[in-house]
Image (cartoon, rainbow, N blue to C red):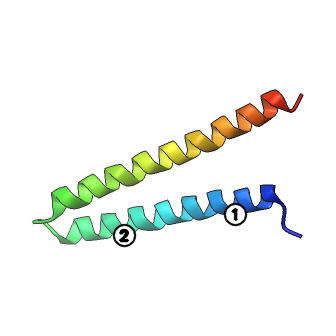
């Protein structure tokens, strides 16, 4: 039976893989499209911002669970 913790680990893994794939895609498109460079730079920045926020939320959850589990 799958536990809630395993589902959370799977979700964070999917978020990480999705961000990496999207970042690579944007970098490839950025190298080929000079007229759309601004759009892909903004998308790349948004990907990095999303990843940082997702990891921060994950770490805050872990800190709260550690603090209140005692």
Q: Residue at x 40, y 61 (%)?
A: 23
- Asked whether the beta carbons under mark 2 and mark 1 sit within 8 Å of each other, the answer is no
**Chain-order first, disc 2 or disc 1:** 1
Q: Position of residue 32 (x, y in %)?
A: 20, 72
Say which quadrant the C terminus sits in: top right
Distance CA(mark 2)–CA(mark 1) = 22 Å
Q: Secondary structure at mark 1?
A: helix
Classify mark 2: residues with Cα within 10 Å, few (<14), some (14-19) or many (20+). few
Classify mark 1: residues with Cα within 10 Å, few (<14), some (14-19) or many (20+). few
Q: Residue at x 65, y 61 (%)?
A: 11
Say which quadrant the N terminus sits in: bottom right
Please indicate whether residue 4 sits to the left or right of residue 16 in the image. right
Q: Which residue in the protein does label 2 denote?
A: 25
Q: Position of residue 15 (x, y in %)?
A: 56, 60
Q: Residue at x 32, y 65 (%)?
A: 26
Q: Position of residue 37 (x, y in %)?
A: 17, 60
Q: Which residue in the protein does label 1 denote?
A: 10
Q: Quadrant of residue 4?
A: bottom right
């Amino acid at each position: 039976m799958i536990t809630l913790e395993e589902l959370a680990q799977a979700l964070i893994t999917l978020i990480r893989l999705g961000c990496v794939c999207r970042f690579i895609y944007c970098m490839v498109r950025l190298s080929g499209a000079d007229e759309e460079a601004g759009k892909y730079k903004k998308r790349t920045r948004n990907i990095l911002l999303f990843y940082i926020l997702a990891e921060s939320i994950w770490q805050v959850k872990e800190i709260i669970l550690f603090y209140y589990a005692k």
